[in-house]
Image (tube, rainbow, N blue to C red):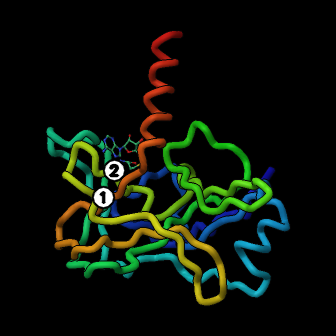
Amino acid sequence: MSSQRPSPSLAKPPHWPPNVYYISTPCYHSSVPPEVLAQIRPMFATSGSGRAPRSAVIIQRISDPAHPAKGQHGLFAAKKIPPRTHILDYTGEVHGDDRPGSDYDLSLFRSPDGNNVGVDASHMGNEARFVNDYRGVKPRPNALFQERKTESGELRMSVWSGSECIRKGDEILVSYGKSWWQARSMELAEESMI
Ligand SMILES: C[S@@+](CC[C@H](N)C(=O)[O-])C[C@H]1O[C@@H](n2cnc3c(N)ncnc32)[C@H](O)[C@@H]1O
């Protein structure tokens, strides 16, 4: 199975990992059935950029020893972001196969006949792949994942600010959901039994 080849020409933001393609629009993997693709990306849809204005977000290495993702990276506000604002789309490889090993895979769409479509940013994506979960960092998330449709009808998963404004310099934090963490703790328990 294959994916369309991402364009290598985009300028990467600071701290971008060398082994990950930087893409501003989704790439579609051949595992997405054509009838499902037609629902999430109408024929006439043009892939407008999912990029945040370059100044809205910044990727930073986490050095705070109290942060549970210390040594990794996170996404931070480069300027004040008003409440309920579209920050950026979560780009990646849109796929219909299972990606159990990916820590960068989000659910995008479930069709009535049971086809699941995800967006996996483990090998290609944009700044949104660095959004961390709020647990152990702040009492509550200040942002959320929420789908949107582009003007031409393409379904995107996006990062939006919550009900309060995000101050410049704040880490942008979502909730991955209890089931995401439950699946990870089950994996760890299984690994420790091997
Ligand atoms: C989508 S990535 C987020 C970006 C990641 N920090 C990085 O530098 O690539 C998800 C991974 O980030 C880490 N992570 C995110 N939120 C976390 C949290 N609240 N506590 C511990 N680890 C977290 C976990 O390792 C998780 O598998």
* Disc 1 to disc 2: CB gap under 8 Å: yes
Q: Nearer the viewer, residue 19 or 113?
A: 113
Q: Which residue is mark 2?
A: 133
Where on the picture, by quarter, is residue 5?
bottom right
Q: Which mark is residue 12?
A: none
As helix, strand or loop, the secondary structure at mark 2 comes to: strand
Q: Residue at x 43, y 29 (%)?
A: 185
Residue 42 lies, with reference to residue 106, above or below; the image says below
The disc, 1 or 2, on the residue closer to the chain's N-terminal end is: 2
- Marks 1 and 2, how far apart in space? 5 Å
The spot of residue 82 in percent (x, y) is: 25, 81
As helix, strand or loop, the secondary structure at mark 1 comes to: strand
Q: Is mark 2 within 8 Å of ligand 1?
A: yes
Question: Residue pushed farthest top?
Answer: 194
Is the residue marked by circle 2 packed among few (<14), some (14-19), or many (20+) residues within 10 Å? many
Residue 174 lies, with reference to residue 137, above or below; the image says below
Left or right: 165 as drawn, with respect to 58: left
Q: Nearer the viewer, residue 172 or 48?
A: 172
The spot of residue 150 in percent (x, y) is: 58, 83
Q: Residue at x 27, y 79 (%)?
A: 83
Q: Which mark is residue 173?
A: 1
Left or right: 139 as drawn, with respect to 59: left
Q: Nearer the viewer, residue 33 or 57?
A: 33
Amino acid carrying label 2: it is Asp
Is the residue marked by circle 1 packed among few (<14), some (14-19), or many (20+) residues within 10 Å? many
The spot of residue 29 in percent (x, y) is: 73, 58
Q: Quadrant of ligand 1?
A: top left
Residue 189 lies, with reference to residue 161, above or below; the image says above
